[in-house]
Image: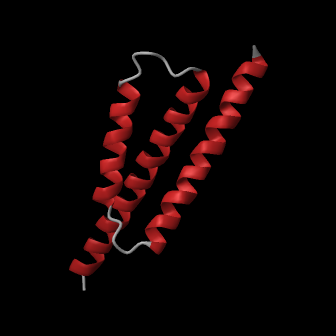
Amino acid sequence: MNESINWQEEKYQEVYEQEIRGLERRRSHDPTCTVQDVKGILTHLYNMDGSDWVGRGALQDVVMQATIAAYEHVIAQWEKEERLAQVAKENR
């Protein structure tokens, strides 16, 4: 039982970190990428997650959960940075 949980945790962490790196790379290299673009992808991921009527299996469920968590994290950080930048701009 412990081994089955361990592979899921390892896969989750692997996918989560991979998605974070990919999103950060896209943000830094693609000046046209906006937080709204990333939110749109997250909305699509939510729809895909909710459309699992035939069953993806344990592996794909872990991948989907990690991917969604990474997108949520990046969006939260991005919006926080934008708020801080706005406050700094207003205080000039």
Residue at figure coordinates x 39%, y 38% from the top left:
45
* Colouring: secondary structure
Q: Quadrant of the N terminus?
A: top right
Residue at figure coordinates x 26%, y 72% from the top left:
87
To which quarter of the image does residue 21 belong?
bottom right
Looking at the image, is 42 positioned above or below residue 56?
below
Residue at figure coordinates x 25%, y 80% from the top left:
89
Most distant residue in the right direction = 3
Point out residue 84 in the picture as x, y percentages from the top left corner.
33, 69
Most distant residue in the bottom direction = 92
Residue at figure coordinates x 39%, y 16% from the top left:
53
Most distant residue in the left direction = 90
State the residue in front, 88 or 10.
10
Point out residue 20 in the picture as x, y percentages from the top left corner.
54, 54
Residue 3 is left or right of residue 18, and the answer is right
To which quarter of the image does residue 88 belong?
bottom left
Most distant residue in the front direction = 54
Looking at the image, is 58 positioned above or below residue 33?
above
Looking at the image, is 17 positioned above or below residue 57?
below
State the residue in front, 80 or 44.
44
State the residue in front, 53 or 21.
53
Number of callouts: 0
Point out residue 59 in the picture as x, y percentages from the top left corner.
61, 27
Q: Quadrant of the C terminus?
A: bottom left
Residue 63 is left or right of residue 74, and the answer is right
Residue 54 is left or right of residue 12, and the answer is left
